[in-house]
Amino acid sequence: MQGQGGDDVVLAVAGLRKSYGDNEVLRGLDFAIRRGECFGLLGPNGAGKTTTLRCCLGLTDPNAGTITLVGEPVPKAAREARVRVGVVPQMDNLDPDFTVVENLRIYGRYFSIPAAILSERIPRLLDFAGLANKGNASIRTLSGGMKRRLTLGRALINDPELLILDEPTTGLDPQARHLIWDGLRQLLSQGKTILLTTHFMDEAERLCSRLAVIDHGRMIASDAPRALIAAHVEPEVVEVYGDEARQWADARGRTLADRMELAGETAFCYAKDAAPLLNDLSRQNGVRYLHRSANLEDLFIKLTGRELRD
């Protein structure tokens, strides 16, 4: 298993299994996260990502396997391990009855951080979250992006060795997403370690040095993002759409592309060399097309399928 063992491993998971009745949610997961990297855990809804995180934090007991979190065995020493971990949950759980600073101070007390250290640390976290002028503001007055940035800042109150982010930018506008990305890059440059789950493939491609794709409780691929794309997907993609796209795909696209998928009225044509496709499309009426390089979303769709997961 890549990265297992050694002092540089912050989280190590081996043979992780979890069932709920007859439903086996995790089926022998193995992965390790090295100090200073951003590791992405990707998968469709129901793939087992949330259960994996809960097991790693000691909030759910696995049926089999071993977990070592910041050097501590989980679930045996989960409480000791969690003191050295920061978590940003899917949904913000800030206390609306307190101000921004009060939320940070009260959370810091959960970790028994002395008041003097909190007083020194909180202004830095407010600067990091872009909320330096909002310390006395009520949580109820903050925008969604502000609340998300505060939740991220709050997760750093204990100066964690590992930061676990569960879909940190879901529901945010592009400006707020970019602000959070900038903050996460800053943390990585400072040597922080991040475990990220996300449904935004561009987010994973921008931030993750390595990632794993899981589906139906099993790991189906793991490597650096560009290495995974190169190993599994043709380098060029032509998306063809318009009134005549399906007719063109059946008549011409299947022979010109190395691989083609139809999704609704769009034909996704994958090719080692897109020149023949582009030459043919330039002479067609009733179709429009977009030529681009393969990306992480293409990899994700190829490995997990296009069907909707609920």
Image (spheres, rainbow, N blue to C red):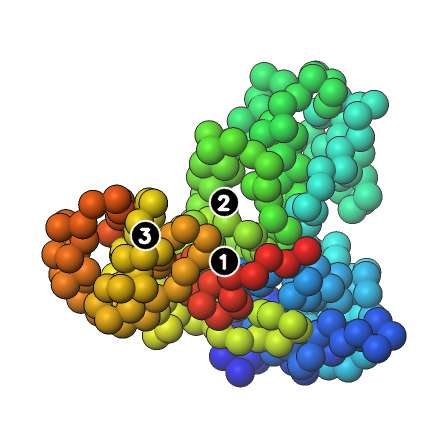
Label 2, label 3: how far apart the Cα atoms are:
41 Å
Q: Type of residue at label 1?
A: Cys
- Cβ–Cβ below 8 Å for labels 1 and 2? yes
Q: Position of residue 172 (x, y in %)?
A: 56, 34
**Relative vertical location of residue 301 with respect to residue 31 in this rendering, above or below:** above
Task: Report, in whole angstroms, how far the alpha carbon at label 3 lies from the one at label 1.
Answer: 39 Å
In the image, what residue occupies the spot 67% across and 81% down? 28
Residue highlighted by disc 2: 184
> Horizontal and vertical percent for residue 108?
75, 39
Q: Is residue 249 left or right of residue 189?
A: left
- Camera-side residue of 141 and 235: 235
Residue 11, image x and y in percent?
62, 68
- Mark 3 / mark 1, whichever is N-terminal: 1
106 or 280, nearer to the observer? 280
Q: Amino acid at mark 3?
A: Ala
Q: Is 74 displayed left or right of 129 in the figure?
A: right
Give residue 13's position: percent from left, percent from top.
Answer: 65, 75
**Position of 230 relative to 278 (above/below):** below
Label 3 Cα neighbours within 10 Å, binned few <14 / some 14-19 / many ≥20: many
Q: Which residue is mark 3?
A: 245
Pick whichever of labels 2 and 3 is earlier in the sequence. Answer: 2
Q: Nearer the viewer, mark 3 or mark 1?
A: 3
Q: Residue at x 55, y 52 (%)?
A: 199
Name the residue tied to disc 1.
Answer: 38
